[in-house]
Image (tube, helix red, strand yellow):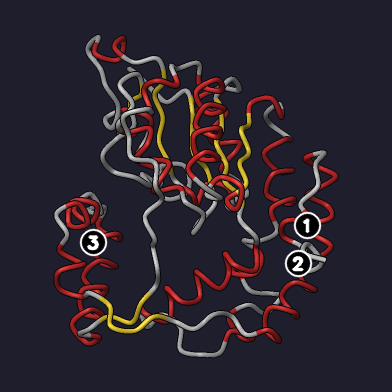
Amino acid sequence: MALPDFLGIGIQKAGTSWLHQQLYRHPQVFVPDRKEIHFFNRWYDKGKEWYAGFFPSGGSEKSYKAIGEFTPGYIFRENVPERIVEVLGTDVKFIVILRNPVDRLYSFYKMKKVQADFKGRIEEFGNLDSKTFKRGLYAVQLKNYFRFFKKENFLILIYEELFRDPESQKAHLDRLARFLDISPEGFRTIEQEKAVNQTVIPRYQSLYRGALWVRKHMLKAGADWIIPLAHKVGIRKRLFGGVQSFPPLSASDRQWLEHAYASSINELEILLGRDLNIWKPDRNG
C-alpha cells in the first residue's frame, strides 16, 4: 500500500491549485487528479485503505520519487497533525504557501459573496471571532504542527514572492525540487505563468447558485471527484463566465484588517526566523 510522503496543507486562496498542477505534470511525482481529498479533516473515519486508493499500487509506486496530495484545509484543523502521525508517521514532508492574511481574507470573502454563502459586509465576515479571520493566524496553525513534526519537514513559501515574476517562480520550483529530492528539469517544460484567478460576478447568477447547491450536496456525498473534472473540461467558464469584477479592498477596510493581523504577523516572523515586511503597511516607505 503506497501512501503519501508529502502533503500540501495550506493555505486556502494562496496558489495551491497552481502548485498542484506543477507537481501533477512532473514525471517523477504522483499527485491524484483530485485535489483536496480531505481525508485527515473530513473523511478520516473511512480508514487508511480508502485513502490509499487514491495513490499508485501494485508496484507502480516505484515509478515515482515523491507521492503526495494537496488539501489546504489540513493546516487549520487542530486534530489533523496527530492523525497524520497515526497514518503517515513523523517523516512526512509538508508544503505550505502563506499569503498576506488581509488579501487572503478578501479573496475568500469575494468567493463567498459570489456563491451567496455570505451576504453581509466584510466587517462581519472578518470579525475577530470568525473562522475566516482565524484562518489568517498562521503562527498558531504552524505551532500546532511543530508540536508533532520537525521544522525541517516544512517548505514554507510566500505567495507574493512566489508569483512575483517567472524567474521567481522558477527559483521557488527549484527549492521545491530540492525539498522533494526530484529533478528541477521536470518543471522546465511546464508553462510557469500563473493564471489570473480573478473573482468575478457570474453571468447567470441564479443558475450559478443552483450549480453550487448541487456541488455542496456532492461534497457531502463524497462525490466531489466530479468537480475537478468539470473544471478540467471548462464547464464553469463556458456557462458562468464573469461579467463584472470586484473592486479592490477599500483603504479603510485594509487598514483595520492590517491592524488586526499585525501581532500575528510579528509572531510568525519570530517563529520562522525571517521578516515579513512584504505584508506590512509601511513596506513601501
Q: Which residue is mark 1?
A: 265
Which quadrant of the figure contains the N terminus? top left
Q: Amino acid at mark 1?
A: Ile
Q: Residues within 10 Å of mark 3 (few under 14, many from 20)?
A: some
Q: Is residue 112 depicted above or below 21 in this figure?
A: below
Q: Position of residue 204 (x, y in %)?
A: 20, 85
Q: Residues within 10 Å of mark 2 (few under 14, many from 20)?
A: many
Nearest the eye: 161 or 74: 161
Q: Position of residue 30 (x, y in %)?
A: 33, 26
Left/right of residue 87 with respect to residue 276 in the rendered view = left
Q: CA distance from mark 1 to mark 3?
A: 37 Å
Q: Which residue is mark 2?
A: 261
Q: How many marks?
A: 3
Q: Which mark is residue 53?
A: none
Which quadrant of the figure contains the C terminus? bottom right
Q: Residue visible at 33% across and 26% down? A: 26
Name the image quarter holding residue 211. bottom left
Q: Which residue is mark 3?
A: 218
Q: Which SS class for mark 3?
A: helix
Left/right of residue 150 with respect to residue 214 in the rendered view = right
Q: Amino acid at mark 2?
A: Tyr
- Looking at the rendered image, the disc whose residue lies closer to the viewer, 3 or 2, is 2
